[in-house]
Amino acid sequence: MNKAPKTAIQPTRADDYPEWYQQVIKAADLAENSPVRGCMVIKPWGYALWENMQRVLDGMFKATGHQNAYFPLFIPMSYLEKEAEHVEGFAKECAVVTHHRLEPDGQGGLRPAGPLEEPLIVRPTSETIIGAMYAKWVQSYRDLPILINQWANVVRWELRTRLFLRTAEFLWQEGHTVHATAEEAMEETRKMLDVYADFAENYMAVPVIKGEKTAGERFPGADMTLAIEAMMQDRKALQAGTSHFLGQNFSKAQEIKFQDQSGNLAYAWTTSWGVSTRLVGALIMTHSDDDGLVLPPRLAPSHAVILPIYRDDAQRDEVLAYCRKLRSDLQSITWDGQPLRIEIDDRDLRGGEKKWYHVKRGVPLRLEVGPKDLAQDAVFVAQRDNGEQKSMPRTALLSDCITILQAMQDRLFQKALDLQIKNTVEIDNEKDFRKLFTPKNADSPEIHGGFAVCYFASEEDVAPLLQELKVTIRCLPLANVDEPPGKCFLTGKPAARRGIFAKAY
RNA sequence: CGGGGUGUAGCGCAGUCUGGCUAGCGCAUCUGGUUUGGGACCAGAGGGUCGUAGGUUCGAAUCCUAUCACCCCGACCA
């Protein structure tokens, strides 16, 4: 009878991490590939998760003075050409619209007709189109700052795609701001990075390292790029959000000028910042286990699912009535300013099948209610993250459920933080560096690596080694800004700061 | 775009090397029954132009050619 595997997801993380990731998404019904190459379909459970992220982030943006707006999907090709580095960075992955009509090809099919005078590109990011509008809107220092965000889809024609982590089309938000001074723009850049870090740690329960990107890893066209980096369970780094100080690069390219208080014409200072549906990937890879998705309660589409258990129709009615009452009692409790999200699963399925359905989808709490529980006015409570399950008096559940959810949220964060700390090492020589990033089995690499914190003198010096080991400099942690200088782990040359080195997504 | 691999039922696969009965198996689905605090069991049923297009042959899932799609490894990236 026991044909069931020991884990709901196969292979396990240890067996084959990338395949495990795909299987978790499938088992939790978050998304799947579409007929359009490289583009995914986000299914209801995955989209609900994204909507929760959107709701929280949007609130944070508003609280920091930003407003939402919407700019076009299409960008005239000439706009992209205005900022040299920007062109170089994105030209290779742009989808281009060249025609505006279809006509019959005479063989039952269609062919493009009506060539456009100037091709349009599908936005890979919107600095140029938004900048063009800002140039019109900004005349005086009184027009500044402009603090705008847009929720949108963007397209980057990627060669290799992975659900949520890298797809040809993805959903994101992009904030674009204009300021009168460099200091103010820099402050905005840092502020939004802090917002992202706050969101990642307190809502996603994903510990992150705030840092500055090196020149080689910077956003094309930026003077400075700040990012938050997270460690996934396979110890690879994932960039979870970026905030760019664009200096006057775009304002010069697009003539965003204003008259300052002394009447002089000056170029404005701009920033941009964004997070994408990639965050869903980060969430999956940080918390999920070999039984499927594990969700941080604060972002879970459902906080708890109630599973009625009964044998016959008489019991069914009684149990269901109890469950509905329990649901409405729970729904009257608020957490994070929102009512608890509770569903009852009364589908006519086998108990085990139903239970595993919700385990794989990562619902934080499973509340099982059968006739015996009814008799004791108790509920059988199972927690998704640690597998703990116990019977609780109904009244205790109602009074403690917020505590339980918050404790789970904290446990998830602490567990992820422990993993990050355990796999972050200071390295001061090439031998140890190579050892950390070289798998024992080259053909099917086991989980290895981590974050290496190393002094380095120049990107050029370490580039060949990094390329060989497939390692990148993730960032220069902001926390290390004031550290004493040291010596490059590779060349021994004097080095001002340490960087975080890791394999990355 | 370079190297490798795979396309057979909704999903996962066998069969291909060595061409030959009506193309199979597991899971899922549907029907009937038995079960019921837990990923159940028995019996039966439906579902395929074997990725696509040509070719070789008495005969092709199997051999040949072309083509498309997807996966893995490189180069590039949120």
Image (cartoon, coloured by chain):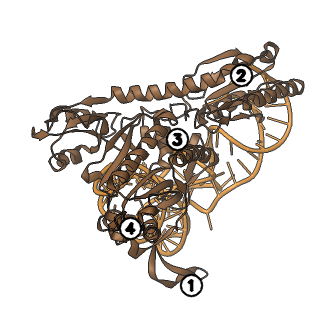
Chain colours: A brown, B orange
Front of the two marks 3 and 2: 2
Displayed quadrant of residue A100: bottom right
- In screen coordinates, is B9 left or right of B57? right
* Residue shown at 51% from the left, 37% from the top: A204
In the drawing, what numbered circle is on residue A267? none
Within 10 angstroms of label 1, few (less than 14), some, or many (20 or more) residues? few
The chain that hosts pointer 1 is A
- The residue where tag 3 is placed is A23
Q: CA distance from mark 3 to mark 2?
A: 35 Å
Q: CA distance from mark 3 to mark 4?
A: 53 Å
Q: Amino acid at mark 2?
A: Leu
Q: Position of residue A153 (x, y in %)?
A: 52, 59
Q: Amino acid at mark 1?
A: Asp
The mark that comes first in sequence, 1 or 4, is 1
Disc 3 is placed on an element classified as helix
- The residue where tag 2 is placed is A398
Front of the two marks 1 and 4: 4
The mark that comes first in sequence, 3 or 2, is 3
Q: Position of residue A485 (x, y in %)?
A: 16, 35
The chain that hosts pointer 3 is A
Q: Amino acid at mark 3?
A: Gln
* Residue shown at 16% from the left, 47% from the top: A458
Q: Quadrant of the N terminus of chain A?
A: top right
- The residue where tag 4 is placed is A258
- The residue where tag 1 is placed is A105
Viewer-proximal residue among B35 and A241: A241
Q: Position of residue A373 (x, y in %)?
A: 77, 17
